[in-house]
Image (cartoon, rainbow, N blue to C red):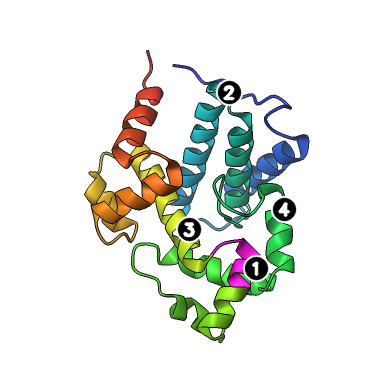
Amino acid sequence: MSLNTHFSDQLMAPHETRQLDTCGQMLVSNDSPIHETLAQELSVVAAQLFEAACKARGGDFEATRAHIAHAIALLRGIPHLGPCGAVKSSNAKINIIRGGLPAWQMRKVIAHVEANLSRGIKVQELASLLRLSASHFCRAFKSAFGATPRDYVIRRRIEVAQAMMLTTSEPLYSIALSCGMCDQQHFTRSFRRIVGETPSMWRRTRRGSLKVD
């Protein structure tokens, strides 16, 4: 199977194309630091773009644009809630800056979440980073991201799991634990609620699409 990597104007706005090009140049630039997590971060972005291609093939252009916008947000270091989230992708940066958390606090929380997705993350832990009470933090976080801290963290776990499901042969229970899920049953329930199908079905259909005829 060959994928046409050229997205028409109907799928991707010109400014989004420029943003993606700029982000790609920054990632491969000699001036950019290379972190141990870069491969994982790029695999998550790739999974979003692959999902966009699948949605485009099915004629769902709204979902296609949402996945592309989410991939761009990930490359810019501002992961929001993705296509199923409450935050509009085109306004993600504006909403975060104008919301209840200043930009520097948003970056601090995002960095902590990304570095600790493999274990449990409590709301009080995130609130303590910013020296806020849990209730104040939850209100500010929801104002900034359009979702609760718990929903945001679960969404990020699912996205990392999707990347692992596409790029590794690890069993689902191992992927679930690696992404901080307490067990495979919890992982399956959360995955189905967010993605709309079970992890095993999603993996089978997506990896089948990757095979060359």
Q: In the rendered image of this protein, does residue 76 appear above or below residue 12? A: below
User: Residues at badges 1 and 3 in contact (C-beta under 8 Å)?
Assistant: no
Report helix, strand or loop for mark 4: helix
Residue in the foreground of this view, choosing between 191 and 37: 191
Mark in front: 3 vs 4: 4
Lower position in the chain sequence, tag 3 or tag 2? 3
Mark in front: 2 vs 4: 2
How many residues crowd mark 4 within 10 Å: few (<14), some (14–19), many (20+)?
A: few
Which mark, by number, is residue 178? none
The residue carrying mark 2 is: 59
Which mark, by number, is residue 35? 3
Amino acid, disc 1? Ser
Give the magenta-colored segment's residue range: 140-147
Lower position in the chain sequence, tag 2 or tag 4? 2
Report helix, strand or loop for mark 1: helix
User: Residues at badges 3 and 2 in contact (C-beta under 8 Å)?
Assistant: no
Tell me: 185 left or right of 44.
Answer: left
Tell me: 146 left or right of 196.
Answer: right
Quadrant where the N terminus sits is top left
Q: Main secondary structure of the magenta part?
A: helix
Q: In the rendered image, which quarter is residue 9 located in?
A: top right
Lower position in the chain sequence, tag 1 or tag 2? 2
Report helix, strand or loop for mark 3: loop
Question: Alpha-carbon distance for marks 1 and 2?
Answer: 33 Å
Give the x, y percent position of residue 20: 66, 41
Question: Alpha-carbon distance for marks 4 and 1?
Answer: 13 Å
Residue in the foreground of this view, choosing between 6 and 195: 195
